[in-house]
Amino acid sequence: MYSGGEEMLDDVIRAGADEWEIPVGYVPGMRVPGRFFLSDALAAILEPGAVQQLANVATLPGIVRYSLGMPDIHWGYGFPIGGVAAFSLEEGVVSPGGVGFDINCGVRLFTTPLRREDIKKARDFIESLFHAVPTGVGAKSSLKVSPAALMAMMEKGAGWAVNAGYGVERDLARCEESGAMKQADIRAVSAKARARGIPQGGTLGSGNHFLELQVVSEIYDQTAAAAFGLLLGQICCMIHCGSRGLGHQVCTDHLKILESATKKYHVTLPDRQLACAPIQSPEGTAYFGAMAAAANYAWANRQLIMHAARREFERMFGIEYESMPLVYDVTHNVAKIEEHTVDRQKVRLCVHRKGATRSYGPGTPGLPGDLAAIGQPVIIPGSMGTSSYILKGTATAMERTFGSTCHGSGRVMSRSQAKKKLTGKEVADHLLSQGIIVRAPNEAAIADEAPEVYKPSSEVVQVVHDAGLSTLVARLSPIGVIKG
Amino acid sequence: MSYEELTHTADVKIRACAATQDALFSEACQALMQVMYGGDRQGGTRRVIDISASDRESLLCDFLSEVLYVSEVDGLVFRYADVCLDGMHLHAVLDGEPFDQARHNMGTEVKGISYSGMSITESTKGYMLDILFDV
């Protein structure tokens, strides 16, 4: 444990108020320095393992400028969580270790015309949402997804769901990549991955995945909030989940293939989980295509869950489906081909974000027309019982972090410690005393994700706001949480 | 034979100890099932896994990944794995029961088996494994 910024790890250099540099040489073979964003307060809980992992990423071939860490950086596998790295398409690599097992784990937020006082029977409503969205280990979808529909989910993503009646056309404009990556190659998705995908469409999963009923409790930026469709006192719904077993299997399958490729292309790695291949090699292309297919499945999945939640709002409150617009859908575990400016040259790069959110600034291609002048909505979920934040993307992020910002608050306590310290009932009772209802398949899931096990989300977003990687628009407070 | 959960902030890190490599692999499988489904796991339904790999760590990773797959797709929760290693080939007979929402909802999904921080060490007392499950 380190007690403050002045006691930062040896050899890590202060590069700015909230910015630190890991010099080349911190681990052997680094091609570029590491850079991470952290306040002095958050530096006190920085794990040496996370810094080591950030330095390891800097050894990968074709990495451009820096191996970057967002202020929610913590110890993961392969890349640290909160890690961002961009690679040259000619000399660079693609690595499942830079995306993770849960491909396109992400968050979406939709608003409603309801206000806090309209939710009179909150517990009944949370219960109905809990039953509408299959949740937890072993939960199966009530949808009958045919093999043909699965293929379409992997190719068309959220677009498949909207075409099948699970949403409206406008939803697609409010997703990164319009809810589908064009590079999806279903031939690179194994029969095993497909078998796992069939029964899980529209399921939430477990761990830190959730569906949360929230109220807009503070507006920091009126212009951006208006453009995003956020009003003070309004009820919103946030959904956090990913590509389920299909995505996990894609990662597992291709990690094995890329392990062999690492040797074939003579790449020396400090960690086997960083297995990689040149982006344009057959192995790299296959992984990228399969990853994109899994990412599309995740967009379809979040679309299905949103549809189920909207139907419950319709049923319980008699409001119109169309009166619940999607604010935005962000992905925080993905690799994408994007255009960025490096040394005043526009270049196309393969940007890996592992536990990091895209933060496109005003005028960046790919944003919906009505948000072009504002920037991309950035959704940062809080831990259970704490505030979530809506921010907007910035030109600073485009210049400094390949258009990236943090993705959440980051754990500070392990699950085993959490269970020893707290029971699920204690956590649920404490949250209830603050007016927050928690519903989960089991009590252990509640203890695992107690607010105390995370860094305060407010501190993390303050760092990205101060550093200009995304700026604050609104704060959302939880009313009810469905834990996976 | 035993296993315990070590401290890891984001994921689940397991340390398992056993007298033989066969038993070590079996322990790792039981730890995986414990994390996912809790302690109430009965037998009665069998599955066989046969796989080969180029090195011991890959063999373990592939074995546990296969257990994850079979468990999810066949909807089975395993009580025990009888593992037999022959060089870089593994033969395992798994004993378990169908997933029961009421009894097996105490755990958390494991998304994948990581190579990061995986180590198998040998001493006079036997074998020790450290392994990270992404949850």
Image (cartoon, helix red, strand yellow):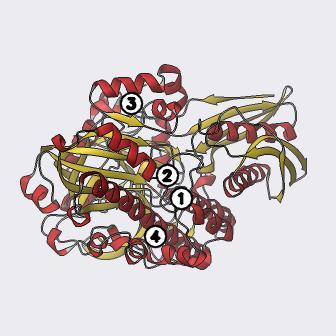
User: B91 or A312: nearer the eye?
Assistant: A312
Give neighbour class at mark 4: few <14, some 14-19, many 20+ (Cα, 10 Å).
Answer: many
Residue A228 seen anywhere in this rendered image of the structure: yes
- In the rendered structure, are the residues bearing label 1 and label 2 in contact, judged by CB atoms less than 8 Å apart? yes
Residue B84 image point, x, y percent: 90, 46
Residue that badge 1 annotates: A141
Q: Give yes or no for contact between labels 1 and 4 (Cβ–Cβ under 8 Å).
A: no
Q: Residue furthest left?
A: A222
Q: Residue at x 50, y 78 (%)?
A: A152
Residue at disc 2, secondary structure: loop
Q: Sequence order check: which comes first, mark 3 or mark 4?
A: 3
First-in-chain label (1 vs 2): 2
- In the rendering, at what x and y percent does residue A373 appear? 12, 68
In percent of width and height, residue A467 lies at 21, 47
* Residue at the image position 10 percent from the left and 58 percent from the top: A226
Q: Amino acid at mark 2?
A: Pro
Circle 3: residue type: Ile
Amino acid type of the residue that numbered disc 1 sits on in the rendered structure = Ser
- For the N terminus of chain B, the image quarter is top right
Residues marked 3 and 2, same chain = yes
In the picture of the structure, the residue carrying the numbered disc 2 is A134
- For disc 3, the marked residue is A45
In this rendering, position of residue A158 left or right of residue A172: right
Mark 1 or 3, nearer chain start: 3
Q: Is residue B129 above or below residue A162?
A: above
Residue on which disc 4 sits: A296
